[in-house]
Amino acid sequence: MSNLLEGKTALVLGVANKWSLAYAIAQAFRREGASLILTYQGERLKKPVEDLATELGASRVFECDVTRDEDLARLSELGRLDAVVHSIAFANREDLDRPFVETSRAGFALALEVSAYSMVAVARAAAPLMSEGGAMITLTYLGSSRVLTNYNVMGVAKASLEAAVRYLASELGPRKIRVNAISAGPVKTASARGIKDFSKILSAVAERAPFRRNTDPAEVADAAVFLASDLGRGVTGDVMFVDAGFHIMGL
Ligand code: NAD
Ligand code: IMJ
């Protein structure tokens, strides 16, 4: 352990299990000396996330479903924060299975609400707690700017999320709050399990990426450490790719 986040408090939203990218990030933040506050989506995740929180030595764990204003209101009652990690996305299964053109009004609204608007709502609640400045980090995917089979409405949601990162960075910069996204390569988490041909996607990426392998969640986590720490002080409004270099490739 080094001490890149010593004395800092980080709020991490989006741990569901030990495969979650948010869990890898929480582990790395802890390794660097941060004090952790975790949130989970709903009652079903209470026990599993509380167990992970104990293992991580988190100081607090509470429920925060980002579609519920009363849950979001609880964020504003936390004490001083130095970092926030937003690692949340959701779209209806059917919208990832059928053609994008079939996306319903309700499905479109839900995907954008959970996956993009929630970043704005979290930033609004957290910014006043970052009295000494801070860093907000969200997770995005290449499907925001390229067409990837089945990513569909999630691609539109990630485009919105990345644009939100720029607007938030612009407005919160004067308060010394930096806002960035990490664009991770495909990782087999709960949000990837069950996606049609996901194993084929992993092997296609591993064949073509400069590193000739897939992304390790620990690499995503270490990039988040950089962005949350003073080492990242010059960076805001950016999308940092942590994807074994896949996004640079053409044919
Ligand atoms: P995950 O399933 O472990 O994490 C998704 C999280 O979103 C879960 O903890 C879930 O509880 C939470 N969530 C969903 N709806 C919510 C709501 N209404 N309120 C609160 N929380 C809610 O999967 P993951 O792969 O770790 O995903 C985390 C982030 O990383 C997502 O934004 C995802 O788009 C992004 N990402 C994942 C990959 C990948 O290949 N796994 C690649 C790039 C980006
Ligand atoms: C998701 C769908 C289609 C293709 C995909 C993904 N690829 C990758 C993902 C290639 C890497 C994972 N990803 C980046 C996501 O953002 C996943 C979001 C997601 C996943 C699910 C599955 C279960 C469900 N709803 C979901 N909503 C969002 O019901």
Image (cartoon, rainbow, N blue to C red):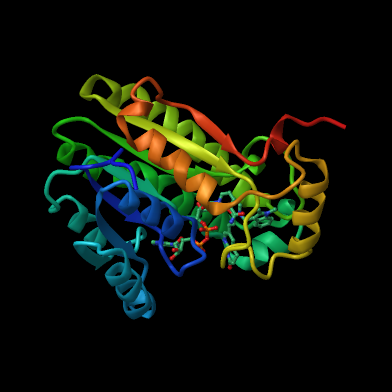
Q: Quadrant of residue 126?
A: top left
Nearer the observer, 232 or 198: 232
Query: Is residue 3 shown above or below 89?
Result: above
Query: Is residue 234 shown above or below 97?
Result: above
Q: Quadrant of residue 60?
A: bottom left
Q: How many marks?
A: 0
Left or right: 196 in relation to 113: right
Left or right: 50 in relation to 9: right
**Quarter containing the C terminus:** top right
Q: Position of residue 180 (x, y in %)?
A: 43, 33
Query: Is residue 6 shown above or below 171?
Result: below
Residue positioned most to the right? 251
**At 22% across and 37% down in the image, what residue appears?**
127
Nearer the observer, 75 or 84: 84
Query: Is residue 140 shown above or below 40?
Result: above
Q: Quadrant of residue 52?
A: bottom left
**At 58% across and 63% down in the image, what residue appears?**
189
**At 49% across and 62% down in the image, what residue appears?**
20
**At 46% across and 47% down in the image, what residue appears?**
221
Nearer the observer, 6 or 168: 6
Q: Position of residue 47 (x, y in %)?
A: 33, 80
Q: Position of residue 73 (x, y in %)?
A: 20, 55
Nearer the observer, 153 or 28: 28
